[in-house]
């Protein structure tokens, strides 16, 4: 029997991304049950043991154990980070077919367990893999969420904070589209407090320049490859992004996050998963916000959706 305050997460995949997520979950006391599932059961058991040994220092009262897909039956969230690793120089879309095979071995046993909660997908290419999870699960789209451009948005706000010498928490700007090469920043929607970022460039052209903003957008887009070249993989940032989404779900926050969700009519698009501002609460994606894009920005959105859709249509499920 489920208790009112039970917050159970099952993590599938105990690699660097998954364990960064698990470690952050423990330290932020986001849930009270965490189950680690991995094809390498011994690794999952070792990771669970290691986390449990740090519980006394975390202020958390979580139950953490290595389990299997049957443990998904009463879970609130199943987070999937399992997949083959991205290689240096390899695009996210190159991972597509290899990770589709991985998902076919994961999603069915999760659903067969009786799971009725929310899927949170972090495996790359995340927009396509989230759509794969939707098709394999048969769930309603509001319960199948991808991390989308939440990390890209965090990177953008961090870099803009440095450029404008402003706390990133007071910067309201988004990265939209594919979590990948076709992502874009809708500068028309970027604000510092309530003042448009573009207005800063108009008022102080010698200090703030549109060319600098475009370079920041490029740096955001290329950040993952730069990190991979330096340390082989990225995991802390995406792990924290996953935790942020989980916190919005368990807190029933109605927070706006650029998660990957299925577009049905917004932005003139349908049947494509893409990173857009979404309202997230205890039910998953409660609503997709349609922000006002310029004609040029809408062209970038259309292009990004076409890229994602083109790759998804090549998959045999």
Image (cartoon, rainbow, N blue to C red):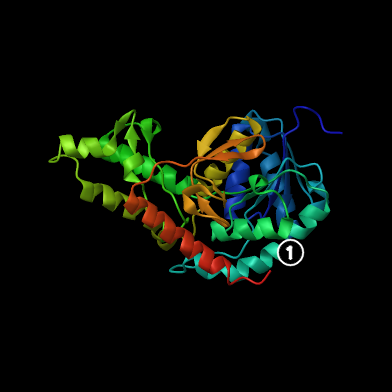
Q: Is residue 24 visible?
A: yes
Residue 211 in the image: state x and y as whole percent: 21, 50
* Left or right placement of residue 213 versus residue 53 in this view: left
- The residue at the point 47 percent across, 49 percent down is 267
Quadrant (top left/top right/bottom left/bottom right) for the N terminus? top right
Q: How many marks?
A: 1
Residue 254 in the image: state x and y as whole percent: 57, 31
Quadrant (top left/top right/bottom left/bottom right) for the C terminus? bottom right
Q: Nearer the viewer, residue 128 or 88?
A: 128
Determine crowd level at label 1: few under 14, some 14-19, many 20+ residues with C-alpha closer than 10 A: few
Position of residue 233 relative to residue 251, above or below, is: below
Specify the quadrant of the image occupied by residue 251: top right
* Left or right placement of residue 309 versus residue 193 in this view: right
Q: Nearer the viewer, residue 266 or 170?
A: 266
Residue 135 in the image: state x and y as whole percent: 68, 59
Specify the quadrant of the image occupied by residue 97: bottom right
Q: Tag 1's secondary structure? A: loop
Q: Is residue 27 visible?
A: no
Residue 69 in the image: state x and y as whole percent: 79, 53
- The residue at the point 39 percent across, 42 percent down is 292
- The residue at the point 70 percent across, 40 percent down is 52
Position of residue 14 relative to residue 253, above or below, is: below
**Outermost residue toward the right?**
1
Label 1, on which residue?
A: 105
- The residue at the point 49 percent across, 46 percent down is 276
């Amino acid at each position: 029997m489920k208790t009112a305050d039970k917050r159970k997460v099952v993590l599938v995949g105990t690699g660097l991304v998954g364990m960064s997520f698990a470690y952050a979950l423990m330290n932020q006391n986001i849930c009270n049950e965490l189950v680690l599932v991995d094809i390498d059961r011994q690794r999952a058991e070792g990771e669970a043991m290691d986390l449990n040994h740090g519980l006394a220092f975390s202020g958390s009262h979580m139950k953490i154990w290595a389990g299997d897909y049957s443990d998904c039956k009463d879970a609130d969230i199943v987070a999937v980070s399992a997949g083959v690793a991205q290689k240096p120089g390899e695009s996210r879309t190159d991972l597509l077919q290899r990770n589709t095979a991985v998902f076919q071995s994961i999603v069915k046993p999760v659903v067969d367990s009786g799971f009725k909660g929310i899927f949170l997908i972090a495996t790359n290419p995340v927009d396509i893999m989230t759509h794969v999870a939707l098709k394999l699960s048969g769930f309603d789209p509001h319960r199948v969420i991808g991390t989308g451009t939440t990390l890209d948005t965090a990177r953008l706000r961090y870099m803009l904070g440095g450029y404008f010498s402003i706390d990133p928490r007071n910067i309201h700007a988004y990265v939209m589209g594919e979590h990948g090469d076709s992502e874009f920043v809708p500068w028309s929607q970027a604000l510092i407090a309530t003042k448009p970022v573009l207005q800063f460039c108009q008022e102080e052209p010698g200090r703030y320049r549109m060319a600098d903003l475009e370079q920041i957008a490029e740096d955001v887009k290329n950040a993952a490859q730069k990190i991979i070249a330096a340390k082989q993989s990225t995991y802390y940032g995406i792990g924290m992004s996953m935790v942020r989404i989980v916190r919005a779900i368990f807190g029933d926050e109605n927070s706006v996050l650029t998660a990957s969700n299925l577009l049905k009519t917004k932005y003139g698009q349908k049947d494509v998963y893409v990173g857009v501002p979404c309202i997230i609460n205890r039910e998953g994606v409660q609503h997709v916000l349609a922000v006002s894009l310029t004609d040029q920005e809408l062209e970038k959105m259309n292009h990004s959706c076409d890229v994602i859709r083109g790759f998804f249509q090549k998959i045999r499920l």
